[in-house]
Image (spheres, rainbow, N blue to C red):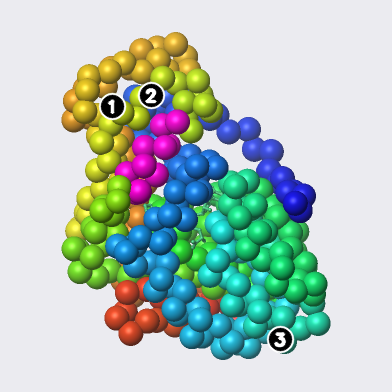
Amino acid sequence: MRKIESISSGRVSKNKENIISLLKNKNKSLPTKYLYDDLGSKLFEEICDTEEYYLTRTEKEIIDQYSMDIIDTSCAQEIFELGSGSSKKTKRLILNALENNDNVTYFSFDISAKALKMSYNQLRKISNKLHIRLIKGDFNNDLNILSSSKKNRLYMFLGSTIGNFDDIQAKKFLSDISNIMKENDSFLLGVDRVKDEKIIKMAYNDKKGITGKFNKNILNVVNKEYKLNFNENNFAHNAKYNVQKSQIEMYLEAITQQSIILPNKESLDINIGDKILTEISRKFSEKTLKMLFNKSALVPIKCYTDKKNYFSLYLLKAKKYF
Ligand code: SAH
Ligand code: AVI
């Protein structure tokens, strides 16, 4: 197994205090990153294979169709994927990059060691001209300490993971990318589009209940991390679509009265019907994206979309070079 390189900006984050305040707040929430431990990463892969979750299939379809154009347009000599997960969709892009270059380095960057292992297993046999680097880090904190390269780098952020950020987080993430980009670098961003509400809701409420398991697993992760006493059987999966905000809101809804002992030993009463927000998943219109790109100093140079207009991939450049 290839060695995992860990990076951290060393920023002292007040994690415990943060969890306490998020759970004591009238609108309770947990940080979305805790959905992804070993089991969470495995469950996410299972979600991608469900009939209802159109996002992965559609994005893969677009990549398979336009991969060569993406590699040619970006002149990519190396690929740096953020929140790579298992890198399944990336394979085609890497193969095309290998057609254009003697050798290619692929960086898989993720917070989950399991995701990095899956990524390595997915790609290790492709070619001996492919050099794979596995980097464990947090894309909300660590982007400014990434080392740059003399080669033309294609940054990628697929799966509409940008939809898991609110407006402020999205603007910060995109600005961080645009800041680290050099003149010949490009950025490929996958976004899920606004569409019929029924299709979106079904994608987050699959018949087999895998999304529910994925959602509840966050409680096991925070239990381990903060020595809490959540019991996943005391909660129900609740994913609803907020039309005004064009976003899925994924909650855990309490189905029994319970008390949680917080890291400061305080007891927190949770009543039946109380909800904990675990994730938002925004669906984007052209107008929202234009605004986001503009505020983050990014310029779209190409947009690839499927026939149904469900999902898009934007190829972007940093505005500072125009
Ligand atoms: N890009 C893949 C995976 C999407 S799932 C795809 O399109 O299928 C989101 C990925 O982001 C997961 O692998 C998760 O572990 C990773 N992730 C979530 N929060 C993160 C964070 N703060 N920093 C780095 N990676 C993170
Ligand atoms: C990773 N992210 C874009 C997924 C999404 O659709 O928001 C995570 C997910 N949550 C529930 N199902 C899938």
The picture places residue 128, in percent across and down from the top left corner, at: 80, 72
Is 160 a magenta residue? no
Q: Is residue 222 left or right of residue 104?
A: left
| Residue at position x 53%, y 70% in the image | 89
Residue of label 3: 99
The picture places residue 143, in percent across and down from the top left corner, at: 63, 54
Q: Nearer the viewer, residue 8 or 289?
A: 8
Q: Give how far apart the Cα atoms at labels 1 and 2 are.
A: 8 Å
Report whether the residue tagged 1 is closer than 8 Å to ligand 2: no
Q: Secondary structure at mark 1?
A: helix
| Residue at position x 24%, y 29% in the image | 254
Q: Secondary structure at mark 3?
A: helix
Q: Secondary structure at mark 2?
A: loop
Q: Which residues are magenta?
A: 210-220
In the rendered image, the vertical position of residue 56 relative to residue 239, given as above or below: below
In the rendered image, the vertical position of residue 62 relative to residue 289, given as above or below: below
Residue of label 2: 230
Q: Is residue 246 visible?
A: no
Q: Are marks 1 and 2 in contact (CB under 8 Å)?
A: yes
Residue of label 1: 234
- Circle count: 3
Q: Is residue 137 left or right of residue 197?
A: right
